[in-house]
Amino acid sequence: MDKPSKLFARDREWQGLSRFAASPMSATRGGAALGVVSGRRRQGKSYLLQALAAATGGMYFAATEATEAESLRLFSEALTRHTGEFPDTPFRDWNDAVTHMFRSFRDRPTAVIIDELPFLSRSSPALPSIIQRELGPGGSGEGSSARLVLCGSAMSVMGELLSGQAPLRGRASLELIIHPFGYLDSAAFWGITDPRLAVLVHSVVGGTPAYRHEFTQGDGPTGLDDFGPWVVRTVLNPQTPLFREARYLLAEESAIRDPALYHSVLAAIASGNNTNGGIASFIGRRSDQITHPLNVLEDCALIRREPDLFRQGRSRYRIVEPLITFYEAIMRKRWAELEIHRAEQVWAATRQTFLTQVAGPHFEALCRAFALESGAEVFGEQPGEIGPGTVSDPASRSQIEVDVVALAPQESSTARRIVALGEAKWGETIGHHHLHRLARARDLLALKGFDTGDTVLALYGGAGFTAELTADAAGDDRIALVGLDRLYRRPA
């Protein structure tokens, strides 16, 4: 099925959805099929599913916050509009509604999309169990051709839908998470061709599609000189939806009961206190007291735990949504000033903080994404694992933080092979002392039993490289220099 021209990117997502919607009823295993689509708000899930319904002649129903009785009435009306068939009697509950829905689709595979499922399950907790029963042996789904898609934005709720002992576990033949655009697609979506500007914009709004048009009225920076003024007139402007968006992202998650605590945890991470102990110290709690908030934020897909690839049992936390990082690092402390339209003064005072606490760490994350996407092209082989790592240096009684570690897939009978060690600097010209630091880390790791025979030393420079380093790297295939132009070059 051809992807509609109005959809930007999302090729893999469309392939998965269209394949599921058109999957034939087999002779051995006929009946309805279940798909689950999730993703944070503003990622274009509804837009994608509405396009699927239009392309396949399917049914699309968007739930709202309502009582069970009203939701049943709205669902009945949507089903009647689509099928042209009126139920004999009004639905008493979701048992009637789900049964009637499956029996309404018999002839050909048809996409039946229920969007914002968490709104329904909040007032009708038994709904997932009812769907599970009807999909099972003897249920109304046995002879149905419905391709039921359940979609939702509450990540903690959707994550539990198919996990553990959940009723629908093992029932879904499609599990699709709609992620923000990758940094390359995001730059193309914003129409940005300058890679430095692309990094700066992505470090503020990330790859969320809705922020491009709906939240900024199509206002994008016209060039590097316009980046600061663009920040002032959009994200720091109380008259735009983007101004309060970071707060709403937290408030929309039902699992978050104490917003003050969660904002403090996020502020700690945005300030560079990204270990369990560092976060606990920053907010004045014991380490065991923040385990639950960290787990909740991870379940909500707002933070990610990144294991230290060289120190077993140690992890760092990173905020997944750049807009939240920007809010915690820049906006939250100066909120009162921003509300009275002092954006120019606030931006002037916090621009350096933005470069060090927002743009710099974000650039490191983009470099890790680049190493995963383009590893085969840059290092000569595809890494099996990418992440940060810490190497202890006993001679200097210090630690070497390696920003981008690329490991080969684990082979049980051999030493773990290091494909590449990388250092990323956003605002500093990279020279030989950065290279020597990586070489020292490589030698120390060899002493620890890692295989470093073919390790590439990769340097990622947002501000470029010295002429001497560039000349030396040109003749050495074990040194890789990745500037902004290469970072934004699509892999072959």
Image: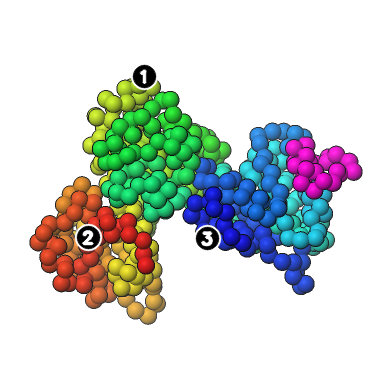
Q: Quadrant of the C terminus?
A: bottom left
Task: Assess whether mark 2 and mark 3 are in contact (beta carbons under 8 angstroms).
Answer: no
Q: Relative to 123, does residue 158 appear above or below in the rendering?
A: below
> Mark 1 vs mark 3: which is more N-terminal?
3
Please tell me whether mark 1 or mark 3 is closer to you in this view: 3
Q: Position of residue 211 (x, y in %)?
A: 45, 39
Q: Position of residue 209 (x, y in %)?
A: 47, 44
Which residue lies under the disc numbered 2? 459
Q: For residue 340, which numbered disc appears in the image?
A: 1
Q: Relative to 417, does residue 468 appear above or below in the rendering?
A: above
Q: Quadrant of the N terminus?
A: bottom right
Q: For residue 12, which numbered disc appears in the image?
A: 3
Write the start and end of the magenta stretch as one range.
73-95
Residue at the far bottom in the pictured view: 413
- The structure residue drawn at horizontal position 74% and vertical position 52%, both measured from the top left corner, is 131
Q: Colour scheme used in the picture?
A: rainbow
Amino acid type for the residue under numbered disc 2 = Leu
